[in-house]
Image (spheres, grey):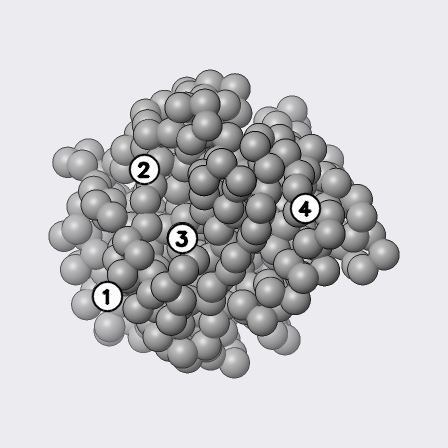
């Protein structure tokens, strides 16, 4: 089975706020769908955390390398693409685009063999997992109004991030967290994301350590992106001294970038994003490396339904993974998938058992948000 063509389409019209200092708008494109078409008619789905113009440019560059390749060998084909792009710059848009291709090739392999991707990754440790609702912080008096409607959907874990946090005062930071904990109650999980990968992030080591101590008073499950993404030595110190687990890594790409962070114990929890890092092939290797060093793997998932499906399959195949991220209020998660997603009475999300990623996109909704009718 050969790769015949790879198409992409950017999602627009309902792009959710990211909390960034240079805020994205609904018509901005930051997520792009990928469809790998084969000569036998099977189509694999992928997702890329990058603007569609950059993805299309990367596909044009990569086409001589992937056209006619074996669509049933995702790991080898993806590594071929990575190895031949060193001279164009490892990481960034090209690596992001390869991520989408890799996800789609695993989807094809699953469909061709009649197996869910998680089983092809070595076996499924679980059939369901807890999703945490991922949403932005707001002023303390408005946090309850943001959280309660999400709680009524069945979520039992919540991550709040970005917004005013770390940008005004310690008093505001604590008021936000206190309001969130009061809204969801003592029995739900609460995670806090400072958003240290934002432009010109000002939070430094002592701020992060003092904030971590404050968060421990509110039973916070982890403290995410407390420092800028290049502050390796400060992360090592913070993880050692913080009373709450420290997480991060969403902006890193490829396993080679993650290795020093894992080996030097910079994180308690590593969070690669499958739509950036190199795809399922690369993320599995990172997860295995993390396990060897006692670091928990929980995928970053602020992307699309395709990214969520890939995260679910990965989570099923890694023994210690116990959460996946669920971006709330995004049509790119909730609307584009036929059948949608259902959270059960325990606050858990079923991991699809159908072949491949286990999801099917609604072509009409895809056209609505991409303007493209022939992607699939």
Residues at marks 2 and 4 touching, judged by CB atoms closer than 8 Å: no
Q: Position of residue 96 (x, y in %)?
A: 62, 55
CB contact under 8 Å: marks 1 and 4: no
Q: In the rendered structure, find residue 376 and report the number of the disc placed on it.
A: 3
Tag 4 or tag 1, which sits nearer the N-term?
4
- In the rendered view, tell whether residue 339 sits above or below residue 29: above
Disc 3 to disc 1, C-alpha distance: 35 Å
- Disc 3 from disc 2: Cα separation: 30 Å
Element type at marker 3?
A: loop
Q: How many marks?
A: 4
Residue linked to disc 1: 146
- Earlier sequence position, callout 3 versus callout 2: 2
User: Of label 3 and label 1, which has the lower sequence position?
Assistant: 1
Helix, strand or loop under label 4: helix
Q: Earlier in the sequence, mark 4 or mark 3?
A: 4
**Which residue position holds label 2?**
130
Q: Is residue 308 left or right of residue 210?
A: left
Q: Which numbered mark, 3 or 2, is in the foreground of this view?
A: 3
Real-space CA distance between mark 1 and mark 4, rounded to the nearest whole angstrom: 45 Å
Q: At 35% across and 75% down in the image, what residue appears?
A: 13
The x, y position of residue 135, in whole percent, is 34, 61
Label disc, if present, on residue 66 of the rendered structure? 4
Please name the residue shown 66% across and 42% down the image: 68
Q: What crowding class fits label 2: few (fewer than 14 Cα within 10 Å), some (14-19), or many (20 or more)?
A: many
- Mark 3 against mark 1, which lies toward the viewer? 3
Residue 7 appears anywhere in the view: yes
Instruction: From the viewer's perspective, tell me whether residue 231 is left or right of residue 302.
Output: right
> In 3D space, how far apart are the residues under numbered discs 1 and 2 (Cα atoms)?
20 Å
């Amino acid at each position: 089975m050969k790769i015949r063509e790879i198409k992409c389409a950017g999602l627009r019209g309902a792009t959710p706020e990211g909390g960034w200092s240079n805020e994205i708008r609904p018509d901005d494109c930051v997520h792009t769908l990928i469809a790998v078409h084969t000569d036998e008619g099977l189509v694999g789905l992928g997702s890329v955390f990058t603007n569609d113009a950059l993805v299309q440019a990367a596909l044009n560059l990569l086409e001589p390398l992937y056209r006619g390749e074996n669509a049933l060998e995702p790991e080898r084909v993806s590594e071929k693409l990575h190895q031949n792009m060193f001279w164009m710059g490892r990481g960034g848009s090209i690596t992001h685009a390869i991520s989408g291709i890799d996800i789609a090739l695993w989807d094809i392999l699953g469909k061709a063999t009649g197996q869910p991707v998680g089983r092809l990754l070595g076996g499924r440790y679980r059939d369901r997992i807890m999703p945490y609702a991922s949403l932005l912080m707001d002023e303390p008096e408005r946090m309850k109004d943001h959280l309660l409607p999400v709680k009524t959907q069945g979520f039992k874990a919540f991550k709040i991030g970005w917004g005013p946090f770390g940008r005004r005062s310690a008093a505001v930071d604590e008021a936000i967290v206190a309001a969130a904990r009061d809204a969801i109650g003592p029995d739900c999980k609460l995670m806090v994301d400072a958003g240290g990968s934002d432009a010109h992030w000002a939070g430094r080591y002592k701020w992060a350590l003092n904030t971590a101590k404050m968060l421990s008073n509110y039973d916070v499950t982890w403290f995410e992106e407390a420092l800028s993404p290049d502050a390796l030595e400060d992360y090592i110190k913070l993880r050692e001294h913080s009373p709450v687990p420290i997480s991060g890594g969403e902006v890193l790409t490829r396993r080679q970038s993650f290795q020093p962070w894992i080996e030097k114990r910079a994180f308690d929890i590593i969070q690669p994003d499958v739509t950036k890092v190199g795809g399922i092939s690369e993320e599995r290797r990172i997860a295995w490396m993390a396990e060897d060093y006692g670091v928990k793997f929980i995928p970053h998932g602020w992307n699309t339904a395709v990214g969520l499906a890939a995260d679910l399959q990965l989570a099923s195949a890694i023994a210690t993974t116990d959460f996946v991220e669920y971006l709330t209020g995004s049509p790119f998660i909730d609307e584009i998938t036929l059948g949608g997603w259902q959270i059960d009475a325990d606050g858990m999300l079923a991991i699809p058992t159908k072949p491949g990623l286990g999801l099917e996109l609604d072509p009409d909704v895809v056209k609505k948000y991409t303007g493209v009718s022939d992607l699939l």
